């Protein structure tokens, strides 16, 4: 009998091509859901949220020669301000608003890359697992909300996913670098850094975890040490003490659980007890791979990837539930391991279903779930603050315009010019206020008139400005003495959208 050699390379190439198609499809869907609303808003007007405006204005200050912590309040590590350097350089050519819009587009593409990386990590479990896990990241409202604005979660997720890909290839030092860079963006990155360090230690041993740790410490030090040396006390106060001392918000466990469910059903349509129960069920499902590994009494060195994804998910979610503050986009921080577990779960269910019919039913059910989640995302993705048109014309010819909200200065294309003129302004007036009054968001407005240092800063900044943009509601946040100075030194000029323009 003559043996015939079979060339398996065509089959391997076919598998590789199908994997590329799956990853590409997931990334395209994610890009469309993120870029669509962004580009529509970009053609119809300015739409910048407070947080992203703070980050962009802080980056403009940094790249104009001021340092966070030493020269202005900034309550996060400096990594995002450093990374926004190219956007601030672009602003000199295109204007501030266009540069921030371009940064939003880049963040949207980062989100698409994250969805593609989730699918890539799941390809070993089959195309259906990759499509569902990557698709979940693509359409989940938490990730879309976090990746249609210049927020920190998108960068954290990208670096965590890169670290997971690198660990699969045993490139432990490079994975450590990725997570060290993540730590320079937001302190929450300490959670995946610790979990993955344990993973590396038990799976690959001491030498590789030492490389991992060296990469993380080295990357974090390169970015943060120059700022710490310039202002060690202020950096500690802003980044560590401020975050550790923040009062607990009124966002309870049930509402936090709701933010993980995709906005398919409004929070008020179900009781708090139901949402809490849903959260517990989802948490138990996420724990299954880890529980399975523990029941089988496997050594952690022999745990498969899903068991570690489970450990990472539980740690991240519990950290988010324990966090003093919680906003709707915070759930995105747990998205990478959650979506990986979801894709793996589809693989497990598919393995227990027989025949093409069962696989077809499962595939159809997965498509329906993703479609429903996408509809939930579309229902909330357009809910954004909008700056009024005509801002640039209204403040034309003014040297220094003061505003509570940096988004107004960016939308008017004057933030960069005002920094160059050394105009007085808050970079983050919210953090400045919270640091003094130490109350929750719900009680903040009522507390501000009695915040003496905060009011003094407003007076000093107002006296160095020749125009003020403020809403009627924001006037109630001013002390009577501050309002008196406003009325003595300025006169009302006109309304610009919902904002009052006062000029000298």
Image: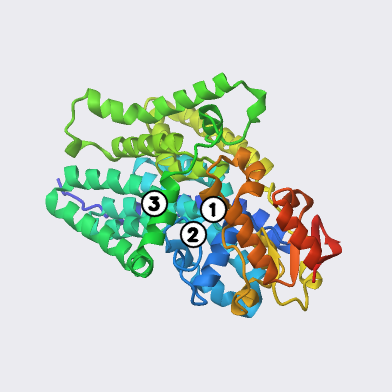
Find numbered disc 1 in the image and state the secondary structure of the residue it sits on.
helix
Q: Which of 494 and 322 is in front in this view?
A: 494
Q: How crowded is mark 2: few (under 14 residues within 10 Å), some or many (20 or more)?
A: many
Quick check: 381 above or below 407?
above
Q: Where is residue 270 in the image (x, y as percent from the top left)?
A: 63, 22
Q: In the image, 393: left or right of 272? A: right
Q: Which of marks 2 and 3 is nearer the N terminus?
A: 2
User: Residue 189, labelled with which disc?
Assistant: none
Q: Earlier in the sequence, mark 3 or mark 1?
A: 3
Q: Position of residue 65 (x, y in %)?
A: 49, 77
Q: Position of residue 172 (x, y in %)?
A: 23, 55
Q: How far apart are marks 2 and 3 (CA)?
A: 11 Å
Q: In the image, 50: left or right of 195? A: right
Identify the residue position indicated by label 2 in the image.
74
Q: Which of marks 2 and 1 is nearer the N terminus?
A: 2
Q: Distance between the residues labelled 2 and 1?
A: 8 Å
Q: Residue at x 43, y 33 (%)?
A: 346
Q: Which of 431 and 331 is in front in this view?
A: 431
User: Residue 431, labelled with which disc?
Assistant: 1
Q: In the image, 203: left or right of 453? A: left
Position of the N terminus, as image quadrant, is top left
Q: Residues within 10 Å of mark 3 (few under 14, many from 20)?
A: some
Identify the residue position indicated by label 3 in the image.
240
Question: Can residue 147 be seen in the rendering of this structure?
Answer: no
């Amino acid at each position: 009998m003559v043996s015939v050699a079979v060339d398996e390379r065509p089959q391997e190439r076919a598998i590789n091509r199908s994997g590329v198609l799956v990853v590409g499809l997931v990334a395209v869907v994610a890009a469309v859901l993120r870029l669509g609303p962004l580009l529509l808003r970009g053609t119809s007007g300015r739409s910048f949220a407070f947080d992203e405006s703070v980050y962009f204005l802080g980056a403009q200050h940094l790249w104009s020669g001021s340092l966070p912590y030493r020269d202005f309040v900034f309550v996060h590590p400096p990594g995002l301000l450093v990374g926004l350097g190219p956007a601030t350089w672009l602003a000199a050519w295109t204007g501030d608003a266009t540069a921030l819009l371009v940064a939003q587009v880049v963040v949207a593409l980062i989100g698409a890359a994250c969805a593609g990386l989730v699918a890539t990590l799941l390809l070993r479990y089959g195309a259906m697992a990759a499509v569902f896990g990557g698709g979940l990241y693509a359409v989940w409202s938490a990730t879309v909300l976090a990746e249609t604005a210049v927020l920190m979660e998108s960068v954290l997720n990208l670096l965590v996913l890169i670290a997971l890909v690198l660990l699969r290839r045993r490139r432990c030092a490079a994975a450590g670098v990725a997570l060290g860079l993540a730590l320079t963006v937001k302190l929450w990155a300490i959670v995946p850094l610790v979990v993955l360090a344990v993973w590396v230690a038990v799976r690959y041993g001491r030498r590789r975890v030492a490389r991992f740790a060296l990469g993380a410490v080295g990357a974090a030090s390169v970015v943060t040490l120059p700022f710490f040396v310039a202002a060690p006390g202020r950096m500690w106060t802003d980044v560590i003490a401020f975050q550790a001392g923040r009062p607990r918000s009124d966002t309870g466990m049930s509402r936090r659980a709701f933010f993980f469910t995709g906005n398919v059903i409004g929070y008020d349509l179900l009781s708090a007890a139901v949402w809490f129960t849903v959260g517990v069920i989802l948490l138990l499902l996420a724990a299954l791979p880890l529980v399975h590994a523990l029941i089988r009494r496997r050594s952690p060195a022999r745990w498969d990837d899903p068991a570690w994804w489970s450990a990472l998910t539980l740690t991240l979610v519990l950290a988010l539930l324990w966090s003093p503050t919680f906003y709707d986009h915070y759930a995105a921080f747990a998205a990478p391991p959650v979506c990986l577990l979801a894709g793996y779960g589809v693989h497990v269910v598919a393995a227990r279903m027989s025949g093409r019919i069962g696989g077809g039913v499962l595939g159809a059910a997965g498509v329906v779930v993703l479609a429903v989640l996408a509809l939930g995302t579309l229902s909330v993705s357009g809910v954004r603050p909008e700056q009024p048109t005509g801002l640039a014309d209204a403040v034309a010819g003014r040297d220094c315009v003061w505003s509570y909200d940096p988004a107004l200065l960016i939308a008017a294309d004057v933030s960069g010019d005002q920094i160059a003129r050394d105009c007085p302004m808050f970079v983050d007036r919210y953090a400045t206020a919270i640091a003094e009054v130490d109350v929750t968001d719900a009680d903040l407005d009522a507390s501000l008139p009695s915040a003496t240092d905060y009011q003094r800063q407003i007076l000093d900044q107002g006296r160095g400005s020749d125009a003020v943009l403020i809403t009627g509601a924001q006037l109630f946040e001013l002390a009577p003495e501050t309002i008196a100075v406003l009325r003595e030194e300025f006169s009302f000029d006109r309304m610009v959208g919902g904002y009052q323009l006062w000029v000298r």
